[in-house]
Amino acid sequence: MPKFAHIVGWGKYMPETILTNKDMEGIVDTTDEWIRTRTGIEERRIASREESTSTLAINAARQALTVANIDPLKLDLIIVATTTPDYAFPSTACLVQDALGAAHAAAYDLSAACSGFIYALSMARDTIVAGSNRHVLVIGAEIFSRIIDWKDRNTCVLFGDGAGAVLLTASEIPGGVLATSLGADGSGADLLIIPGGGSRNPASQETVAENLHTVRMNGREVFRFATRVMTRASKEVAEAAHILLEDIELVIPHQANARIIESAAKSLKMADDRVYSNLKRYGNTSAASIPIALCEAIEENRIHPGDHLILVGFGGGLTWGAALVQWEVSIPLTPLPRWKRIWYSLRFRWARVESFFRRAWRWMEGLPRTPMGQTRFLWFKARDGLNKAGKGISKTGKGVAKKAEKAGKGIAEKAGLSQSGEKEE
Ligand code: ACO
């Protein structure tokens, strides 16, 4: 039975609009200098009106599936860590599941504020190690720009929007997410909170008038808590995995404040080059910050097979968590052949058509019987026919794909090209 959960795919999506510190000067009473020196942030991304947390998550997830070269139908579970879901319900994870065409996957959201991604990674790993799931997609996605008070300079300069995703797969090869360590302290619930909109203060004209639907934060308290738990969680997870801190190649911390990251690095005795940060480009993207940073560390060739990584975060709740990962995938990856990339892009478009048919099915199944009792019968007949046709198309598709791959190799051999596309000597 597979006992290890490896990260085999990854992806990120950042909205296009950039809001610089200079832009912030026109919104609240602040300065570029204050923001840079007190937080380390230079700019952040802001989602457009057409975007929502699910659309960001879907883009990151598509990339992760393409990198892993795994069809969405193989997914067993999708977890979306977010504090800014599209709706109170349905979960954002269900919207992602539908858009990906991951028809066999269960899906749920996880709420642990900025620690959400580590919590979700831990849940995903545990279900794989327990043998319940084989392929699990873990996404951190947030649109904090919709829940911050744009008049409050204490908070609005800190946050940004984005999404990151990883695909975990069961394997017998030792490595992957070796250990996780999670914690919570609800006595600090009021330090970072959106007081309105839940069952305690349901949305009303009064809650809107009192501005209860935006983030309230005690920055100093959160700062103190963060520096303490980042170190503690990192040490705990290293101990749980029986890895010495000296043997950690890279720490990827939650990107909230450069001074918190520096302080944690100092108490862990880690030099700057062993701690990854992209905070200055994106600000605090909450549950998305760690997977986005992981993707960028991979892009920058900072991660190599055999490396030990600590991913560590903290957030509202109060919550915290760390994961120790033994990386096993070679980077750079051999790029997927062009036809395969086209295949995935068509596959994701097809998911929309499937979604339409599923809605149609539900509608048809709800139809009353006609006087002749034929409607349902005809419908089930049509559905069987469609299923058969679908299987036939998929078989033919696979045959064509195999032939195309064979032909491609033949041409490459004739042209004297290696698999990577380089000319062989
Ligand atoms: N521009 C200019 N001045 C500002 C700004 C701003 N944007 N924001 C605050 N100030 C002022 C304050 O009003 C205060 O002025 P005062 O002394 O006259 O009252 C002064 O700057 C200093 O305020 P401090 O709170 O002491 O500033 P500090 O150095 O602690 O930095 C900060 C504040 C950046 C918020 C810091 O405390 C911090 O990063 N805390 C952690 C926050 C965090 O990580 N939150 C996310 C958690 S993750 C999640 O779950 C979402």
Image (cartoon, rainbow, N blue to C red):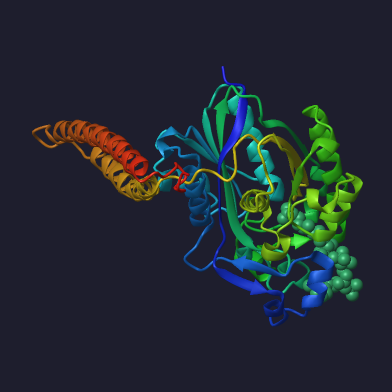
Residue at (63, 31) in percent of width and height? 125
Q: Residue furthest top?
A: 1
**Image quadrant where residue 395 sits:** top left
The quadrant of the picture showing ligand 1 is: bottom right
Residue 408 left/right relative to 132: left
Judging depth in this view, the residue of 85 and 96 nearest the camera is: 96
**Relative side of 238 to 266, left or right:** left
Taking depth in this image into account, of 56 and 413 the one nearest to the observer is: 413
Q: Is residue 118 above or below residue 243?
A: below
Position above or below: 341 against 133: below
Observer-nearest residue: 169 or 88? 169
- Residue 65: x percent and y percent? 48, 43
Give me the residue at 22% from left, 33% from top.
392
Name the image quarter holding residue 1: top right
Marks counted in the figure total 0
The relative height of residue 377 versus residue 159 in the rendered view (above or below) is above
